[in-house]
């Protein structure tokens, strides 16, 4: 029996990630993925019997990494601000690898919220950490100033995700304005996010 080649499987997963990010589970076709990987459809089915199985491999791996990044939130040995700073740093680097992940997740949740919830539940298992819960606890015990944790969460995720979602728009704006701008290592973005976190979570802010 022919053994599956790990290199070919890795090529397929990379191709599938690109196609799923662009078209979502229901818009992607196995032929699209085969074309992207440079193989025939029969070989693709040899490695992955159907689209759903391939999707689970790509999607599950990405979400597993995301929730691993979130584990820092539950580390009670660290101040909450340090946890949020570390989380946002990891989130930005995660989005640098999966720049369309935010749009992709919105599409999938809109298409089938129940299925998405089951996938996330299976990945999270017994992990019960929540940034909102930690923020609320910090406000109640006086570690954080009084603020709306939901608004803070929305602003934080917007600062992290929108630069990747809207990157093509900003490229056009810079080009049309004759502005040369580079943040390939995301240092400027991370500094801006850090400034926001320090300002909103510091009890000494004016």
Image (spheres, helix red, strand yellow):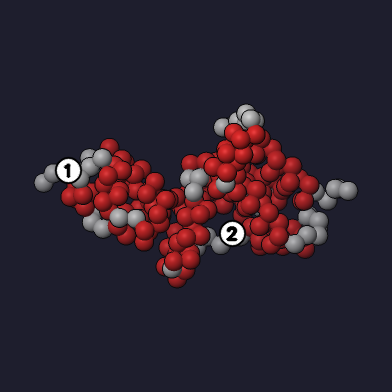
Instruction: Locate residue 95, reporting x and y percent.
Output: 53, 45
What residue sits right under mark 1 in the picture?
3
Position above or below: 70 against 6:
below
Q: Report, in whole angstroms, how far the alpha carbon at label 2 lies from the one at label 1.
A: 40 Å
Q: In this orientation, does residue 172 appear?
A: yes
Between 47 and 43, the one lying in front of the other is 43
Tell me which residue sits at (48%, 45%) in the image: 98
Q: In this orientation, does residue 118 appear?
A: no
> Which residue is at the far right?
206
Quarter-wise, where is residue 4 in the image? Answer: top left
Position above or below: 144 against 34:
below
> Which residue is at the far left?
1
Instruction: Describe the element under mark 2 as helix, strand or loop.
Output: loop
Tag 2: Cα neighbours inside 10 Å, few (<14), some, or many (≥20)? some
Tag 1: Cα neighbours inside 10 Å, few (<14), some, or many (≥20)? few
Mark whose residue sits in front, 2 or 1: 1
Residue 129, which numbered label?
2
Instruction: Describe the element under mark 1 as helix, strand or loop.
Output: loop
Quarter-wise, where is residue 167 in the image? Answer: top right
Tell me which residue sits at (68%, 54%) in the image: 155
Between 72 and 100, the one lying in front of the other is 100
| 19 horizontally vs 37: left or right | right
| 140 horizontally vs 30: left or right | right
Instruction: Locate residue 199, reporting x and y percent.
Output: 78, 47
Instruction: Locate residue 44, reporting x and y percent.
Output: 23, 49
Position above or below: 147 against 93:
below
Count every numbered label the image shows and give the total.
Answer: 2
Tell me which residue sits at (44%, 59%) in the image: 123
Instruction: Locate residue 17, reporting x and y percent.
Output: 38, 47
Between 177 and 198, the one lying in front of the other is 177
Tell me which residue sits at (76%, 45%) in the image: 198
Q: Earlier in the sequence, mark 2 or mark 1?
A: 1
């Amino acid at each position: 029996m022919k053994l599956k080649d790990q290199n070919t499987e890795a090529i397929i997963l990379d191709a599938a990630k690109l196609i799923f990010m662009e078209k979502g589970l229901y818009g992607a076709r196995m032929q699209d993925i085969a074309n992207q990987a440079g193989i025939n459809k029969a070989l693709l089915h040899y490695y992955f019997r159907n689209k759903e199985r391939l999707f689970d491999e790509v999607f599950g791996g990405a979400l597993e990494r995301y929730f691993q990044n979130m584990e820092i939130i539950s580390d009670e040995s660290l101040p909450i601000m340090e946890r949020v700073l570390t989380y946002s740093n990891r989130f930005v680097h995660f989005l640098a690898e999966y720049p369309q992940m935010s749009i992709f997740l919105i599409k999938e949740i809109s298409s089938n919220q129940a299925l998405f919830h089951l996938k996330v539940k299976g990945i999270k298992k017994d992990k019960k950490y929540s940034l909102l819960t930690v923020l609320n606890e910090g406000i109640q015990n006086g570690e954080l100033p009084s603020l709306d944790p939901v608004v803070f969460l929305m602003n934080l995720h917007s600062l992290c995700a929108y630069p990747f979602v809207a990157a093509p728009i900003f490229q056009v704006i810079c080009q049309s304005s004759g502005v040369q701008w580079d943040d390939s290592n995301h240092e400027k973005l991370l500094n801006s996010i850090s400034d926001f976190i320090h300002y909103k979570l510091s009890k000494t802010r004016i």
